[in-house]
Amino acid sequence: MKERFLLVIVVLALASGAALADGYIADVPDANQPAGNPMGVGGFITSNYCAPFAAVNITEYWDAKGVAGPADDVNGNPNLGVTNTAQYIGWWMNTNDDQAVGWDGCPYRVNGDPNFGSKSGTLLTDLATGLAQFVRWDANNTFGCGPALLGGKKGYSWTITANQNLNAGWNEIVAEIDGAPDLGQPPRPLIVVWNFWNPQNAFYNSDDGYTYYDWGPLIKQNPGVDPGEPTENWSVSEEIGHATTAVGYKQCKDPRTGVGPIINYVIVHDNWSITDCDVAVPFTHQLDGSRVWMANVKADPNLAPATPTLTVTVGAHNPGNHTVCPGASTVVYQINLAADNTDAIDINALTLVASGTGDDQNDITSIDLVNDAAPDNGVASKADGDSVLWTYNGGFPANNGTLTLKIPNTRVIVAQNGSINLLIVYHVAATAAANNTYALQLSAVYATGVTYYLPATVNLNNGQLMNSGTVSVLCLDHRDWNYPEYKIKDVYRLRDGTWLRMYSMLPAPRPAISAGGTTFGKKIYVNDPEIGGAGLRIDFTPNNPPTVQEASTLLQIEGRLTTVNGERVLMTPTIAITSPPGPPIPISPVAMANASAGGGDFLYDPIDGIGRRGMTGAVGLNTVGMLVRTTGSFAYVNPTTFTITDHSCGPVKCVVALGVSVNPSWGYLSVTGVCSCEKDPATDHVRQVILVRKQGDIVPMTPP
């Protein structure tokens, strides 16, 4: 059984005189969703804002105390109020990243990372980092990004630490609520994030004034039908929970009966207006037979840790001037990043300035940051243990322009008192003209300490400009480096939004066209001959596919993975047709019954979206993308569509390519084609579809 999570974020602030009553902190705000929109963002999503509201209750609590050291004007002056300030905290947490409405939030967060995708709500991995950077954010600490600064906003260095220990979690909650006055530690409210939130059966105990709840069953998304109950998303692959502000605790027997075992209750402000201010819920509960697990994150505003220092210099094996092929990948620059002994350092962003005669906006299709591991030779090769740390999809915003590569959390980490050699790798478009040149200058690096999320001091090449060598487009028939390629079977383990490449590099197996020279609308299909059962749809919309005259033509492919109508698809790709030695690799159709066409699920996760979804009600090998052959009774539908039935399942839809005719008088057929699928939007059922490439793929037969 998969474990669920309970995340507790403990925010510690220095103050005095906080009222205590049986493990309770008074005067902590109870801000409730929805969020305000003081930033004036069009289409701003005001729900799924529990984490920023849980945080703003705490920052507002300490700001209102007027304590000059850790929190005075941390929310700005004049204060916008909790509902409006929550939007700014949400920006730093990248809550509700949604590119469709232009609300991306802090680019350094994992939410919105193309390798991860966009999620509604706040990712656990983004919550603590976002809160720490909001608190530190001021005129002198912008982290190289951020909205217009809040008026009067002051920044503070809050120490943040984290652990994951369910048994210790309750003790930490008690310790933070109680405080340690003898040691100068006041009581401090916490953030508690639950793996799901469905308190039910409210009952009120007049002795202490708290509203107690039992836990209801697991629900993954609240319909939001009750006034004051916001639509929220939680328990998404243990990435998003429901955040609340813990203000107290109570250990007692069942308050209704006064009998039974001792129950540990956490008293929270849950940012829902339909509940009372002080909601008491059991700290532990059973979920699908498993106990929840938790992580504690402590932030102490009173302690300002030392600021780490990052030193950036040109790498010892910088490639300098060299040539490259159109459509190839090439190392443009090697830089060395070294951290002092204060803390490990997270690289947030690199600012690059382009130069040269080539079009840096259109000739550069993507940029990789590669860890040049060992040996340190300035060449990107997985054989050397190198790895791609982060990929930016696209070129510069303008020719000879400036681009700030903004890197999500922990993608590029320099160990404490350690260093890495980082390669900047261009992917040059196949259309790049011969004799074009490309170069860059590294003008800025933004970084934060891993432990405390404080801005690092960056020493950039001893104050001297860092210029790369010049890359010239000259050759036509080789690649500069051994880029780690995907096999098609591995593509399905990736999330939608992943930018991936499948390169036909000897002696690696090469993708080959399974649909011959025939295309279906804007798409073609490729197969990996080594895998046999793996195929992938390549969609060129809105452009036309390249002209491919023969089946088994070898290709070099890159593009972005997504799901369309139930089928995994590589969108807006670039393809280079290769001319390797030897004959084309043959691809033969696999004979099967109608029921086997399409097959069942393959590694499919309906929450993450990875894997391939199977045909509704089907089992067995998933054959979507494969070249298949099946037989059965013919039924005419229209000039481009017919069905075939062999009584192993219902009729299978067949669609013919342009130039293939359908004869209404056919009776029994053998049909060869690419196995595709389509989803019925009304029922969400997925059915197989066979795409017929050419006239010779249809063979009339005598029924057996």
Image (tube, rainbow, N blue to C red):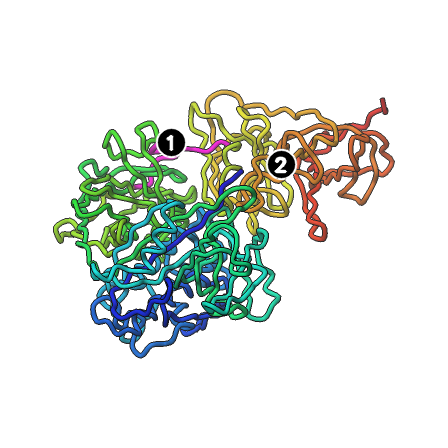
Q: Is residue 311 left or right of residue 569?
A: left
| Residue 240 seen by the camera | no
Q: Which residue lies furthest to the front in this view?
A: 259
State how far apart marks 2 and 1 are (Cα).
38 Å
Q: Which image quarter: residue 151?
A: bottom left
Q: Give the range drawn in magenta.
A: 472-487
Crowd around label 1: few <14 · some 14–19 · many ≥20 (10 Å) = some
Q: Residue at x 49, y 64 (%)?
A: 101
State which mark lies toward you, 2 or 1. Answer: 2
Q: Mark 1 points at which residue?
A: 478
In this rendering, is residue 178 above or below 517?
below
Q: Where is residue 378 in the image (x, y as percent from the top left)?
A: 25, 35
Mark 1 secondary-structure assignment: loop
Q: Which residue is drawn at 68% across and 47% down?
A: 679
Q: In this view, does 518 lie to the left or right of 485?
A: right
Report the front residue among 330 and 176: 176
Q: Residue 322 carries which label?
A: none
Q: Position of residue 606 (x, y in %)?
A: 58, 45
Crowd around label 2: few <14 · some 14–19 · many ≥20 (10 Å) = many
| Residue 166 seen by the camera | yes
Q: Mark 2 points at which residue?
A: 601
**Amino acid at pointer 2:** Asp
In this rendering, is residue 104 above or below 533?
below
Report the front residue among 540 and 117: 117
**Amino acid at pointer 1:** His
Q: Residue furthest left?
A: 462
Which SS does the magenta portion mostly show? loop
